[in-house]
Image: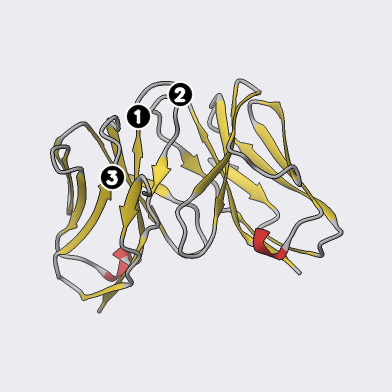
Amino acid sequence: QKEVEQDPGPLSVPEGAIVSLNCTYSNSAFQYFMWYRQYSRKGPELLMYTYSSGNKEDGRFTAQVDKSSKYISLFIRDSQPSDSATYLCASHYGGSQGNLIFGKGTKLSVKP
Amino acid sequence: ETGVTQTPRHLVMGMTNKKSLKCEQHLGHNAMYWYKQSAKKPLELMFVYNFKEQTENNSVPSRFSPECPNSSHLFLHLHTLQPEDSALYLCASSGGTSGHNEQFFGPGTRLTVL
């Protein structure tokens, strides 16, 4: 069983739509949960970062972690064509040992 | 130059060639990483260096040989590669290796092995 599962899509939505991106994870020891955004021909960049369970909001983006169901979500409100990218979820145990475990990434296209 | 830079951006090599990928970080970080990104697969961690010392080798074949001469530079030496090694190779750096340390990625080197 893969540690972080993510549907690779692709996902296509019209401009202004609410986008929901999701991941599941299998290891209950994970404490840190991240969403990275990767534009074409670029490296990933950190978009949102959550410690343990709960919600975190930053502008049009909301990250949500439910540790009871091992579910990670990213919501994008009022989606824009500039949001078109691949979104990668990642998890980490939290200590100095262990590494970021990534999902496959979901390719999102927002059509004008 | 700012952030994490990688050269070359594109590389085509034959299976008998020897080449090197270079990464440089201008962020004052202590940890550096090599990742492999293949289509429809998660990012795969290859190597981790912390304060120039290798702390992780994720069962990477010996045809990939990393080198970290100082905390700002990281190399990946390639020899006798296989076509399945074609991928995007990403370098990253962070302040430390704990979970709360953000990893900053370079743009990657697109490698094609013929």
Give the chain of mark 3. A
At label 1, counting other C-alpha atoms closer than 10 Å, the crowd grade (few under 14, some 14-19, many 20 or more) is many
- Which numbered circle lies on residue A97? 2
Q: Which of the 4 image quarters holds residue A21?
A: bottom left
Foreground pick, B106 / B67: B67
Position of B105 with respect to B83 (left or right) is left
Q: Residue at x 32, y 53 (%)?
A: A5
The disc labelled 1 sits on which kind of residue?
Tyr
The disc labelled 2 sits on which kind of residue?
Gln
Q: Residue at x 68, y 33 (%)?
A: B73
Residue B68 location, x and y as percent? Answer: 70, 30
Q: Residue at x 81, y 54 (%)?
A: B80
Residues beneath discs 2 and 1 located on the same chain: yes
At label 2, counting other C-alpha atoms closer than 10 Å, the crowd grade (few under 14, some 14-19, many 20 or more) is few
Determine whether A17 is above or below A74 in the image.
below
Give the chain of mark 2. A
